[in-house]
Amino acid sequence: MTQQPTSPGSHPHQGHASGDGKDRASMWVAGGTVFAGVVLLVDGLLDILKGITAIASDDIYANINDYVYRFNLTGWGWVLLILGVISVITGLGLLTDALWARVVGVFMASLSLIANFLWLPYQPLWALISIALDAWVIWALTAHRTARTAGL
């Protein structure tokens, strides 16, 4: 019997040794984009709930008298509500792999990070968790470069 020479990649069990690590890393980052969409979606819903709470009742949150960034909680509630709605729409756009959502997602995560920094005295634990998630979303959305976004 003579054996037929096989071309590289023709055997289904042959791996691509040189690109294997790179493929795994890009799959991980692509999965990070989906997770970023879910995080923006959930964070937006939480911002909507925090905003409604602040609009409905100013005395729900602790009264901080000597805080440098002191503001009217009703006004801040409207800001959170608007940011939340835009974040939910952006998260849904990321789940459909829309390019506009990637750009808006970085912008919204940046705004959310700043808003949560200002929110620290009122809800310190949740603000820190949100800041960490926003930083991760920014990384995930900027690290994943598809052929379509590589030219940007």
Image (cartoon, rainbow, N blue to C red):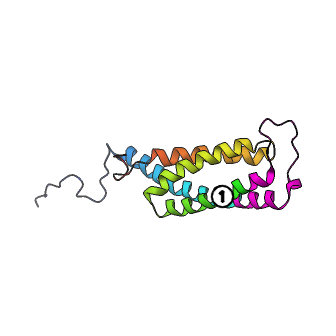
Name above or below for residue 66 compared with residue 103.
above
Q: Mark 1 points at which residue?
A: 82
Q: Is residue 71 magenta?
A: yes
Q: Residues within 10 Å of mark 1 (few under 14, many from 20)?
A: some
* Near-viewer residue (45 or 15): 45
Q: What percent of the width, then of the height, locates residue 7?
A: 18, 54
Q: What percent of the width, then of the height, locates residue 33?
A: 50, 53
At 75% from the left edge and 49% from the top edge, which residue is drawn? 126
Callout 1 secondary element: helix
| Count of numbered tags | 1
At 72% from the left edge and 43% from the top edge, which residue is drawn? 128
Q: Is residue 129 left or right of residue 141?
A: right
At 75% from the left edge and 45% from the top edge, which residue is drawn? 119
At 49% from the left edge and 57% from the top edge, which residue is drawn? 101
Q: What percent of the width, then of the height, locates residue 20?
A: 36, 47
* Near-viewer residue (23 or 60): 60
Quadrant, the N terminus: bottom left
Q: Is residue 25 left or right of residue 9?
A: right
Q: Which quarter of the picture shows residue 99? A: bottom left
Q: Does the magenta stretch include residue 51?
A: yes
Q: Which quarter of the picture shows residue 19? A: top left
Q: Which residue lies furthest to the left in this view?
A: 2
Q: What percent of the width, then of the height, locates residue 117?
A: 71, 41
Q: In this view, does 124 lie to the left or right of 82?
A: right
Amino acid carrying label 1: it is Ile
Q: In this view, does 142 lie to the left or right of 43?
A: left
Q: What stretch is highlighted in magenta?
A: 48-77
